[in-house]
Amino acid sequence: MAQATAHSSAQGQQHPLKLYLIVWAWLFILSTGSYLVDYFQLEGALRYSLIILFMLLKAGLIVAVFMHMAWERLSLVYAILVPMSAILVFVAIMVLESDHTLLSRVTFFASGH
Amino acid sequence: MAEQAFSNLDTAPVGEPRPHSITADFSSDRSVFKNVSWGKAMMWIFLLSDTFVFSCFLISYMTARMSTTVPWPNSSEVFALTVGGRSLPLILIAIMTFVLISSSGTMAMAVNWGYRHDRRKTATFMLLTALLGATFLGMQAFEWSKLIHEGVRPWANPWGAAQFGSSFFMITGFHGTHVTFGVVFLLIIARKVWRGDFDRGRRGFFTSRTGRYEAVEIMGLYWHFVDLVWVFIFAFLYLW
């Protein structure tokens, strides 16, 4: 790790080709997994947790290895990843908002859109 | 005090991943992202802003879907294709996903060969990436025309909530636009690599500056980001 960091700082990001091929294979496996979730028509909590799990694993592999985030300087990693937590706050706000909207619609427009 | 701060800074090992380096980097009164070129830092910041744009689209889709009283169309059936008399759910989307992941793989290869200064292999893998990107766009055009033919519009569709069409066209359209720009820039950078611009220090047409093989990695960051966004679109728009 320390050696890889030193290397990457000296002349760009150089990593063994094998690492990329392994990650590539994993991305294929995980994508197949998420497709099979739909193919076998899994339902309920199992379906949604598997979708989220495969999604996060794929995203993590792409960002960490393909985009070299795992070897970047920590100040860059934090500058990019920490602001993304604002998205989760936004999601939480809009979940509350849409629940409220749905409730109002069901209450006031029994058959409406 | 100041002297001590700066001496700390100078002796701190470059790229050592520990929390202390973050405060030191941000308080150094110099460029924050040490050993990260401005081109790469700016691409990352652009990608962060782009993340917010796509998040807003996906969150508005979530809001529309959660707040409507009308049933949402079943994406598994909407995007099914009949192959050999058998209806396969989401098959085209699955193929599109594999094409885009393959293009991410070839892009990673291109970046790798770029740092080894292998001009031909870098350019070849970039062209292969562009080709896979164009294939993806072709399949997306097929999917759009199929849905439009079946009567999906941004304001209505035959199966349920009207917001399905607007969310679908907005999100996949914006993603497709990103892929299109990616293909164009891949071709531009691949041409520069093939011609040996980064080996001979030839000045760019637009910026009049000499480029480095790092341009391939920065291009790769953008391309992987496009793949990354597709991972989320695939999960939320197609599978959910």
Image (cartoon, helix red, strand yellow):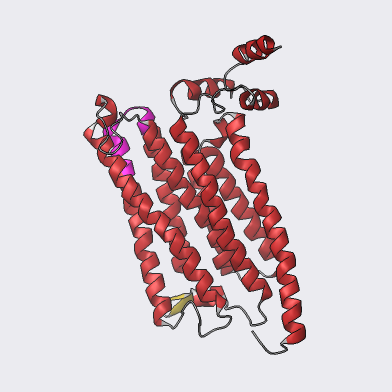
Q: Nearer the viewer, residue B22 or B29?
A: B29
Please determine whether, in this image, residue B166 is positioned above or below residue B228.
below
| Nearer to me, B216 or B38 | B38
Give the camera-side residue of B24 and A32. B24
Q: Position of residue B230 (x, y in %)?
A: 50, 56
Residue displayed at 42% across by 55% down: B178
Give the quarter of the figure containing the C terminus of chain A: bottom right
How many labels were placed on the picture? 0
User: Which portion, as a residue range, is magenta?
Assistant: B113-126
Image quadrant in which you'd find residue A52: bottom right
Residue B40 in the figure: left or right of residue A104: left
For this view, does B157 lie left or right of residue A37? Answer: left
Seen at 34% across and 64% down, the residue is: B138
Say which residue appears at 42% left-offset and 50% top-offset: B102
Q: Position of residue A34 (x, y in %)?
A: 57, 60
Is residue A85 on the magenta stretch? Answer: no
Label the magenta part by its dominant secondary structure.
helix
- In percent of width and height, residue B198 lies at 29, 29
Q: Position of residue B44 (x, y in %)?
A: 51, 40
Q: Quadrant of the N terminus of chain A?
A: top right
Residue pushed farthest left? Answer: B195
